[in-house]
Amino acid sequence: MTPTSDQPVKNRNLWMILAVVILSITPLIFIRGDYEGADGQAENLIGEIQPNYQPWFEPILEVPSGEIESLLFVSQAAIGAGIVGYVIGLYKGRQQGKNRSS
């Protein structure tokens, strides 16, 4: 197999993906603690500060478990990242098309 001009780019992309995976997993391995969300922490803090506080609204949909709630949150983040990535790629492709036609 002969190396192409894309080979260094592919290697660089693989190294960046590996670095992101390592940076994501390392804290989970070495830092022990409760990974509770900010909503739960805020609710506990409000309960300590103002014990008689009543929320203004109730949730529209009450999910049966924390795992499903996490799944919905991650799905929302993935859809948002996909949209942002699509828009960035779209504008970059348009820019490259303009540069080639000039």
Image (cartoon, rainbow, N blue to C red):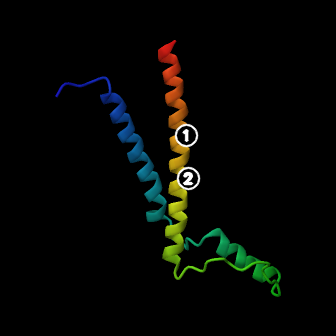
Q: Outermost residue, bottom direction?
A: 52
Task: Tell me: 30 left or right of 6.
Answer: right
Which quadrant of the figure has residue 48?
A: bottom right
The furthest residue to the front? 101
Counting from the top left corner in percent of width and height, residue 12 is at: 38, 35
Residue plotted at (52% across, 70% down): 70
**47 relative to 19, above or below:** below
In-front residue for pair 61/27: 61
Q: Which residue is mark 2?
A: 80
Asked where in the image residue 57 lies, by quadrant, the reply is bottom right
Location of residue 76 by image quarter: bottom right
| Residue positioned most to the top | 102
Q: Residue sitting at 53 percent across and 19 percent down? A: 98
Q: Point out the tag, 1 or 2, that comes first from the N-terminus.
A: 2
The vertical placement of 66 against 79, above or below, is below
Give the x, y percent position of residue 101.
49, 15
The residue positioned 39% from the left and 38% from the top of the image is 13
Residue 95 % position (x, y): 54, 24
Q: CA distance from mark 1 to mark 2?
A: 11 Å
Mark drawn on residue 87: 1
Q: Secondary structure at mark 1?
A: helix
Badge count: 2
